Amino acid sequence: MDGRGYLSILFHCAPLLLLLLFVYHCTLAGGQLSPITGDGGGQGRFQTYIVHVQEQTGASNLSVQHSHESFLPNATLDSGEPRIIYSYRHAISGFAAKLTPQDLLAVRAKNGFLLAQADDNTFLFTTYTPVFLALKHWGGLWPESSRGEGIIIGIIDAGIHPHHPSFDGTGMPEPPIKWRGRCDLLPPDSCNNKLIGAAAFKQGRRKPSPVDNSGHGTVTASISAGSFVPGAEVLGNAKGTASGTAPRAHLAIYRAYFGDQGTAVDLLAAVDQAISDGVDVLSMSIGQEPKPLYESSVAMASFSAIRNNIFPCSAAGNFGPMPSILSNDAPWCLTVGATTVDRRIRATVRLGNGMEMDGESAFQPDNFDSNLMLPLVFPGDRGSPEALNCQSCSLKRSAVAGKIVLCVTDQYNNLERSDTVKSAGGAAMILINRLPDGHTTNADPHSLPASHLSNADGQKIVAYIRTTVTPTARLIFKKTQFGARPTPAVAAFSSRGPSLNNGGILKPDVVAPGVNILAAWPTEVGPNPAGNSSSTFNFASGTSMATPHVSGIAAMLKKLHPEWSPAAIKSAIMTTAYTRDGHGNAIADQTGGGNASYFAMGSGQVNPAKASDPGLVYDLKWQDYVPYLCGLGYSNESVAAIVKEETDCSKIKKIKAEELNYPSMALTMRAGESKTIERRVTNVGEEKSRYEKKTEEPEGVSIDVEPERLQFSNLGQTKTFRVKFTAKSGSSRKGEVAEGSLTWISGCYTVRSSISISFT
Ligand SMILES: *[C@@H]1O[C@H](CO)[C@@H](O)[C@H](O)[C@H]1NC(C)=O
Ligand SMILES: *[C@@H]1O[C@H](CO)[C@@H](O)[C@H](O)[C@H]1NC(C)=O
Ligand SMILES: *[C@@H]1O[C@H](CO)[C@@H](O)[C@H](O)[C@H]1NC(C)=O
Ligand SMILES: *[C@@H]1O[C@H](CO)[C@@H](O)[C@H](O)[C@H]1NC(C)=O
Ligand SMILES: *[C@@H]1O[C@H](CO)[C@@H](O)[C@H](O)[C@H]1NC(C)=O
């Protein structure tokens, strides 16, 4: 008996499962779309399109709407319903409308038309389990003054459950004068100086409710800017004071999700309103499947954000560990991946042969006898795929009653697994990861004694079961423990580069805590996943949870440096990120347990304390992206739709992605080739300062920097330098990737750029 059959199931099923997930999302959202696509009159099929048109400068609101209507054959459908769902003013120049394919042809022929795309699904980037927040371990270094006071974070998400202690406004200052948003759509007494605005967008309907009924929006808002809440816990675990990353920042809520999926037209409407209201930071734990920048609503709306000096922060997605399925990869967005924190809610498994392995579970029963050896069974071993995952109704009572049941996770419905085992009479459950889930485990609030283990540990258990006549195990619950190693490690689910859409910009940009994060949970909207209706905090995992950490950091940087551009803030966060863990080791990847590549962690783990004082920044104005966009080969119309200015790429000196003044560097090279790129840094550290270069050369590539020293005499002064990369000649290294770095060092400042070379 060997483990091969089982291994290959896990291996082959994994990509398939991911694909299925996509399909699942699509089918579901297709269902949601039906009210829009149905025309009710039988005169041809209407679909919702987003239509980008040339900006009309200086137009009044009314004439913008009129101008949008002038693109349409008529203003209303047979039913009397208006064709225009949204007429956008800030997020894009254009509108969302219901059109037949024939209508669309007519629209395309009009003067001023740029491009159109069918409305598309967008997702929330959470895994099933809501999370925990342990900021004191990594973000506690902020001076009192810089907790984001006076800064408004706009949360584009599933709404908010307002009456949670995380959104208490006691002691908060009033919103700044520039704030133009409203808060009257929430129930009375919901709004205060913490929660200053809330709006909702659902296919153009009048006044939908911004109240969260999924939990996701409440979770992300609390991570970003929740107030201090003493005594937070989940089922008695992880007790302590919860706080958002920027606890003095204001929250403005824009709901575009009424379930796990939403659509692009609502997302654009939410950002449109946020820009109009005057937010400073956009926190977007959402996204679409990877797509070209001119089709990505997040990319297009985020460009408008940077033009309005608003910082866009977005999730990389949970499509890992497969390469190159990554969302929100525009160079003007900060793209965030997810890492672990060092807290575990330990549930240890001890096998009959004495082997021990540490897993996790938020349910830690006091009355469970940890000395009790129980029979261990694996109903899915050579059984049905349903039994492998312990899906409902797949387990026979006679086979599992009173036993510990081994189940394989699908990472999305772990709690259903425990319910199935419990209802079939199982005594306990061991949940093991598929191969691609690697070492990423969840502290889930299971309904019976359970432990979630890595794939490596799972394989040991499977081998033990197959080679033992009467396999047994016991579970030992060890409550909340800190100091787990290695920490941080990139979560297996965190989306990986290389991006296929941005011409080679290295993504994600940074990683931040996003596994088992403690966050506010709205008990009033229904039983929480802990099944405990009085627990107001819960654990959640996903790049959805990593993103609001970084949007909170961006809020604090905005407070400290109001004059910094979005690109400068982003540079500060990237060049100060750390690439080693607390023990000096390379940051690990939970997929295989090896070192995380730059395609998993980008510039590294965010370092809030250092980001406030980066020394130098790689700055960009919005105009600097135009030569880059033209260089991608986009049409004049696509570029115009993104930047909201008429553009003639034939008159612009195009640049390659590697030439954009980005804080990381990614190049494609052939053996023997050499390439030189230019970068420009701005002094934001000490007036008079001198920086020396330090390089780590990627294997087989030499790096020459010219000049080798940068001398500054003023703040705001910029210096240009050139980096020459020379790849050794010799045999082809096609498909290989080599990594290195360039760091400018001056006294206490280290300004680091990750360098990634892909050989072609
Ligand atoms: C456009 O509408 C916004 C509110 O929707 C209002 O504040 C603004 O004054 C209007 N602008 C014009 C030019 O009518
Ligand atoms: C508007 O156009 C649609 C299709 O082009 C047509 O079916 C409908 O009757 C028109 N509505 C009005 C009010 O003319
Ligand atoms: C539910 O949570 C509350 C608060 O965390 C706790 O006091 C209570 O014991 C929990 N109830 C159950 C049934 O676990
Ligand atoms: C991981 O990183 C460490 C520290 O940089 C290095 O010594 C080690 O060789 C790396 N391991 C692999 C497999 O690349
Ligand atoms: C952009 O417009 C100019 C002027 O109309 C034209 O010459 C050029 O070919 C266009 N470029 C692209 C990429 O469409």
Image (cartoon, grey):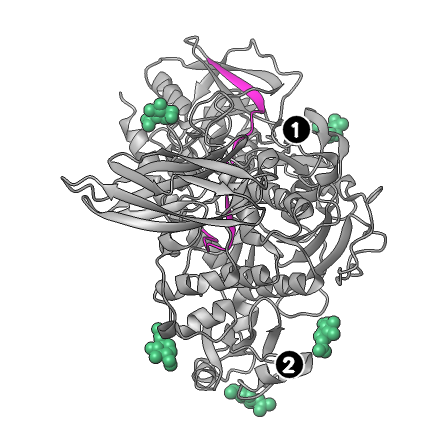
Instruction: Identify which amino acid the numbered label 1 is placed on.
Output: Lys
- Looking at the rendered structure, the secondary structure element under dot 2 is loop
Q: Is residue 295 left or right of residue 229?
A: left
Residue 78: x and y, percent?
A: 59, 86
Residue 394 visible in the shown view? no
Which quadrant holds residue 478? top right
Q: Which residue is mark 2?
A: 59
Q: Which residue corresponds to the image point at 76% horizontal and 34% vertical from the top-left?
A: 229
Q: Nearer the viewer, residue 274 or 535?
A: 274
Q: Which residue is mark 1?
A: 136
Quadrant including the N terminus: top left
Residue 380 counted in the magenta span: no
Q: Is residue 423 left or right of residue 460?
A: right
- Looking at the rendered structure, the secondary structure element under dot 1 is helix
Task: Tell me if residue 157 comes above or below residue 641 in the rendering.
Answer: above
Q: Which residue corresponds to the image point at 24% horizontal and 35% vertical from the top-left?
A: 700
Q: Is residue 329 left or right of residue 615?
A: left
Residue 568: x and y, percent?
A: 55, 49
Instruction: Identify which amino acid the numbered label 2 is placed on.
Output: Ala
Residue 70: x and y, percent?
A: 56, 87
Which mark is first along the chain, 1 or 2?
Answer: 2
Q: Nearer the viewer, residue 493 or 628?
A: 628
Q: Which mark is residue 548?
A: none
Highlighted range, magenta: 327-350
Q: Disc 2 vs disc 1: Cβ atoms closer than 8 Å?
A: no
Residue 39 visible in the shown view? yes
Few, some or many residues within 10 Å of mark 2 (<14, 14–19, 20+):
few
Few, some or many residues within 10 Å of mark 1 (<14, 14–19, 20+):
few
Task: Tell me if residue 444 comes above or below residue 710 in the rendering.
Answer: above
Q: Is mark 2 within 8 Å of ligand 1?
A: yes
